[in-house]
Amino acid sequence: MAVPRLVDKLHGHLEQVDSIVALPNGRCASGGRDHTIRIWNLESREQIALLRGHTGNIVALVPLQGDLLASASADRTVRVWDVLGQKQLRLFDGHRGKVLALVSLLRPPESPGAGVLASSSTDLTVRLWDVDAGCQVSVIRASDNPRNEDCITSLTVPSIGRLVGGANDGSIRVWDTNSAAELGRMRGHKKAVLCLNTLPGGLVVSGARDRLIKLWDLTTWQGMGELEGHAAGLSCIVILPSGRLVSAALDGKIKLWDIGARREIATVLADRSTVSALAAHPEGHILSSGPSDHSVKIWDFENRNEVAALAGHAGAVIALMALPNGWLASGCAGGIVKVWDPDFRREVGHLPGHEGAAITALALLPGGRLLSASMNGVVKVWDIDECREVAAMCRLMTAIAILPDGTIASGSTDQVVRLWASDLSSEVARMPGHSDQVTSLAVLPNSGRLASGSRDATIKIWDVGSRRNFSTLRGHTGWVNALAVFPSGGHLCSASADGTLRVWDAEGCVEMVLLWGHGLGVTALAILPNGWLATGARDKVVKVWTHSRSTMNVRAQSRSDAARLNVHELRSLPPSMRQPRSGEAAAPSVAEGPPIDRAATGAEGGAELGEN
């Protein structure tokens, strides 16, 4: 199952955002209850324009040709804007009640001009507006004897000459836009229809207060099925470029659906109250907003950075080790070590032998053999090529790392980092300092330093020669479960049960980048020789992520400083970009999951996290 990932937030509105729409050239527009429309550059995360003129809430935004944008408001008006010039071009003020919905009618591709808009209102009418002529074209009455039940709350345009509206009485109504005549009604919802959209191929999708999503075929006037799963009424529906459907509800949850299979793919808690606006960007991101913080949130719902998901473990993946030939070794809570070929997405080795005890650490010995440790105090050495056990001994190790001179470093439940002779025959040194179990170790090359992660939520940097603690890295709010070093050697990545991955400047000992992986907390981490990032979690899946498309959030004092960085392009940032803003939340929204009993696995459990 996909894990939706919060990429960033756009801050600027003073009140709740009720409308969002994607614009060409990597931009989006948002309208709020502060009566403003704001234009954003999604690459730089900066506000690039501010449109003022409405005197009520902005309820709908529609992009027109070029840099024209149409807006509808509770102030009873529809307006057309020149986004680049930041000026109003048209004002349509024929409605006698609040405008509820706005769409642009379809027309032949060769048609000149900006076209015709359709708007619905609490005055129980739908009005058509000619943008180029600046006048009202026609008025569609909801009924001969209109009542509140006839109020059209949502609109969509399935084809040229057709307009579809959702009504308070739960019906779907279809009109001929040339004659303004109603062609028919389809019934199926038991409560008001609050949102509509059109799928590729012309199917209409509706969401209502009855918590159902329904599909409609306008050629047969029949329902084509429904999607059930929301626990509250629907507020928004958008279609991704892939054809998948994203729906938002009045309980603050957003769901991703596979329409063909009629199944839910993922759920995320986007807001503590409700999702008031939703839009799909052509790049595949979802834009959402709610009343909690007046921001526009940017989501990756389809894990576009994910290269592979390697499923096969029967328990949570706790340890990962990149192998020199590009393969990947993984160890799970069930005591099994598996070897994978990520390029071909297949399992190439199965190493049992720890008798059900959770694998706590994996390490690569000089000569290419694999060392594995488990919670029952057994350490095993494996010949990977032949998938066979070579040696075994008793040592309780919760973390292992091999130093350049062959010395073996280990962490344990007694909070101490130990150094051992290369054959584990004798202990060389001890380095106490953590206040809880040591969970992970990583060697910082060409520096004589060793990094250790712990259940105390810190990472300590040790000078191996002097056996002293050089620095302590703080930022995670949960157990630090895994550490890995990027090929350049200058950057350390940490994975935590708080659901985050963090990248640190190993030399300056400062946090540079915050990113997100699995929804249930990340329990294992490795960096492959080609720079790809592999992560494991309580969902029992190993995921492999490509560095070239990875989107990360720089922790900055100002959102205008935010940037998109490539893992291989990380460099020292100016001091102003090295610390988070005061009070900034440490973790984003993640998918839901049940509480976990950590005693059996040796890794911290993940709880359901939501956007704060």
Image (cartoon, grey):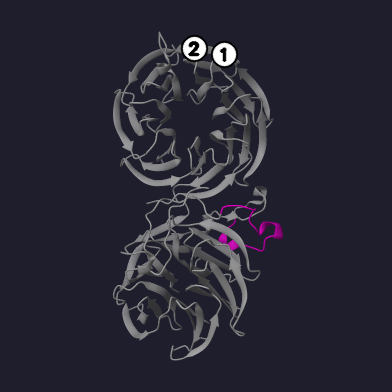
Question: Marks 2 and 1: CB-CB under 8 Å?
Answer: yes
Q: Quadrant of residue 177?
A: top left
* Mark 2: amino acid: Val
Dot label at residue 94:
1
Of all residues, the one furthest to the top in this rendering is 144
Q: Residue at x 56, y 61 (%)?
A: 567
Q: Magenta region: which residues?
A: 565-585
The residue indicated by pointer 2 is 139
The kind of secondary structure the magenta stretch mainly shows is loop
Tag 2, which secondary structure? strand
Residue 487 visible in image: no
x, y percent for residue 370? 40, 78
Check disc 1 and report its element: helix, strand or loop.
Answer: loop
**Horizontal side, residue 258 vs residue 484: left or right:** left
What is the crowding at mark 1: few (fewer than 14 residues within 10 Å), some, or many (at least 20)?
Answer: some
Task: Residue at 29%, 75% (x, y): give it.
Answer: 355
Could you tell whether 332 is left or right of 89 in the image? left
Nearer the observer, 221 or 77: 77
Which residue is rendered at x = 40% and y = 39% of the image?
A: 243
- Quick check: 517 above or below 438? above
